[in-house]
Structures are given as C-alpha cells and as structure tokens.
Image (spheres, helix red, strand yellow):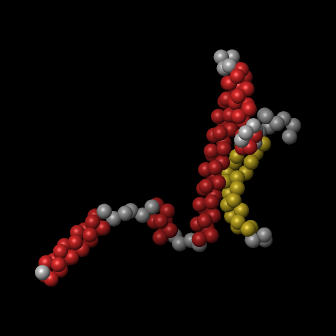
Amino acid sequence: MAGVRRLSIFVLGLATGAFLFIGGANAADSTDWLIENPVSMMDWSSEKAKETAQLSADELNKFMEQRAKQDSDFEYDKNIPAEVKTKTIEDRKLFAYQQQYGYHYGPGFAGYDRQRDRILVGVFVVLDKSLHPGK
C-alpha cells in the first residue's frame, strides 16, 4: 500500500513538473527589461505614472475632438433638431470635465521635485487660441 502511495505521489509530481515546464508563463516585456536593466522603484514608478498621465491626456484630447466635431455638426447640420442641441448643452453643464473645453493636452510627465520633496505627475495643457482669441 505504501508503495502504491509513493508511486502515485511520484506520478503526480512528475505530471505537475511536466505541466509547469510545458505550460510555463512568459514574463512580460517590462519584466524582461527589468531583469536586464535594474532600476530603482522610484524610476519604475515614475515611468508608469508618466505613461498613465499620457494615456489620460490622449483620452482627453480624443474627447475634445469629439466635442469639437459635435459643435461643428450642431452649427452647420440643419437636420439636427433644436431639442437635441438644447438637451446636449444642458447635459454638458452637469459634468465639470466637459466645461473645461478649449484646451489641448500635451505630453504627460512624472518626476521627483527634490526641493519640495514631492512626486509630480501631470500633463502640459495648451489653450486653444482659436476658441479663446487674444489670450
């Protein structure tokens, strides 16, 4: 009985080992890069924060382009009912981010401000002069 138990444990261990060897997970590209190029956690975190800030800026720019197209359609497309235009403008007032219109969001950044002992994450913002002339 003990021999059968040892044999079954051996077979189970062999099957598990084969599964792990054959079905082993591949490391992410970022993990492979870290193995070859060790960096500090601060550098790693800053790079990830910068990527996230850039993704947010890209989403905001896409939103602004959609809104500009919608405004253009409202102005020049006479087939859009006045009720739809009014309802859309009223809905825009409900969301604060939709009131921040007329900007272009530039590159994201992240880093450490040594003088103030702070981590800074953000994006550069440029005023759209076509919508805000003279500023």
Left or right of residue 76: residue 1 = left
Q: Nearer the viewer, residue 113 or 83?
A: 83
Taking 93 as reference, is 38 above or below it? below
Q: Position of residue 38 (x, y in %)?
A: 53, 72
Q: Position of residue 18 (x, y in %)?
A: 25, 68
Identify the residue at the far front of this view. 1
Q: Position of residue 102 (x, y in %)?
A: 76, 38
Task: Tell me the residue at 78%/69% (across/down).
Answer: 116
Identify the residue at the far right of this view. 134
Q: Count numbered badges in the picture.
A: 0
Identify the residue at the far bottom of this view. 2
Q: Quadrant of the C terminus?
A: top right
Task: Tell me the residue at 79%/34% (across/down).
Answer: 131
Answer yes or no: is residue 131 visible: yes
Left or right of residue 2: residue 88 = right
Q: Quadrant of the N terminus?
A: bottom left
Task: Tell me the residue at 68%/19% (across/down).
Answer: 81
